Image (cartoon, rainbow, N blue to C red):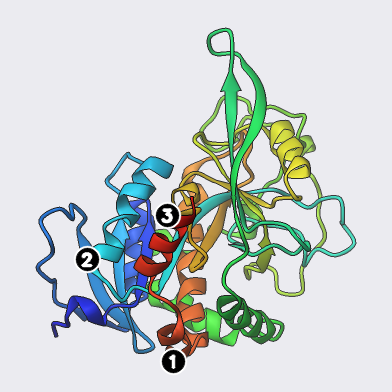
Amino acid sequence: MMLTREAYTVGWLCALPLSELVAAKKMLDEEHDSLNLPTEDENTYAYGSINRHNVVIACMPPGQPGKVSAARLVQPLSQSFPNMKIHLFVGIGGGVPRTLDPKDPEKEIYLGDVVVGWPDETGAPGVVQWDLIERQGKEVDRQRLLSTLDKPDRRLLVALGYLMANHAGRWRHFSKHLEKLSDLEDFANPGIEKDKLYSPTYHHIDGVMCENCDPEQVIGRGSRKNPGQPNFHQGTILSGDSVMRHALERDELSRKYFNAICFEMEAAGVLDQKHCLVIRGISDYSDGHKNGSWQYYAAATAAAFAREFLYTIQGNTVQELPQIAETALVGASRS
């Protein structure tokens, strides 16, 4: 089936072809034929539908993460697809543990959990772009706040509220969405025994999978009601130009910027949009112990959450949203 470019209202954006893009395409209910695009649009898209929402999936080139690549991915979308209403930025991110509240393990962040850029503090932004100021060569002197993304549009938040309420139960819908990747072994849950959070003052010892790290430095955490099942969290996401690999710096930046609960590298490319949701599956703890063992599963949980969001928000609600091309023009005229 081939639709017109005007028929597509949802843009699904991702950064990693082998994990995030694969997971995104598996979430489609139906695939559509490719379309002819304007010559100035250098992106390659996958087309399909989810719960009768027509979706365009776009992915960054291999090995080119970051906000600049994200901006180049997003800019042509509103021109090639003039009725685009929502952008979902879906992929992996590094979590910020909430170990200060060990009495409630449901609020703790574990690998495979999903974080949405949706502040749980009054007046906090959904996404913060931060960066490092370098002085004297490679020495990092201090951090700086560059810009923020306000909380998403109220109509998106209403749908998120319903989704969260549904998941106060038994995860029935989410599990079904996640099952769409069950035939791909790489996207399976690695197992809770491989989810290890080390003390923030303990540095990684040489070894790909922390096989040489001291097990005495692993932080003990309480058990959840449904071990091995991912939880959803709302909070501020920090977006920067570099991968966060230092636990102490992670915690310092989190405290400084609205108790942020996730780090990633691409969302800053869409900071001028209110009709964008940033959805991140937690693949590591933003420390020196990160490895790729949870990347595929984290991409899967983020994609399943995005799919469930599209099964929660109604088609008429999406149609009532202003076109992203129009809102971008309004924003440009005010700047």
Count of all numbered marks drawn on residues in the image: 3
Dot 3 corresponds to which residue?
Answer: 332
First along the sequence among labels 2 and 1: 2
Local crowd at mark 2 within 10 Å, few (<14), some, or many (≥20)? some
Residue at horizontal 52%, vertical 86%?
312
Dot 2 corresponds to which residue?
Answer: 80
Secondary structure of residue under mark 2: helix
Q: Amino acid at mark 2?
A: Ser
Q: Amino acid at mark 1?
A: Asn
Q: Are marks 2 and 1 in contact (CB under 8 Å)?
A: no
Identify whether 147 is placed above or below 103.
Answer: above
First along the sequence among labels 2 and 3: 2
First along the sequence among labels 3 and 1: 1
Between the residue at mark 3 and the residue at mark 1, the CA separation in whole angstroms equals 27 Å
Local crowd at mark 3 within 10 Å, few (<14), some, or many (≥20)? few
Dot 1 corresponds to which residue?
Answer: 316
- In the picture, the quarter occupied by the N terminus is bottom left
Residue at horizontal 81%, vertical 54%?
221
Q: Are marks 3 and 1 in contact (CB under 8 Å)?
A: no
Secondary structure of residue under mark 1: helix
Between the residue at mark 2 and the residue at mark 3, the CA separation in whole angstroms equals 19 Å
Residue at horizontal 49%, vertical 55%?
334
Q: Is residue 36 left or right of residue 73?
A: left
Between the residue at mark 2 and the residue at mark 1, the CA separation in whole angstroms equals 22 Å
Q: Amino acid at mark 3?
A: Ala
- In percent of width and height, residue 263 lies at 59, 46
Mark 3, mark 1: which one is toward the viewer? 3
Relative to the observer, which residue lies in front, 213 or 119?
119
Residue 215 visible to an observer of this rendering: no
- In percent of width and height, residue 22 lies at 32, 62
Identify whether 321 is placed above or below 105.
Answer: below
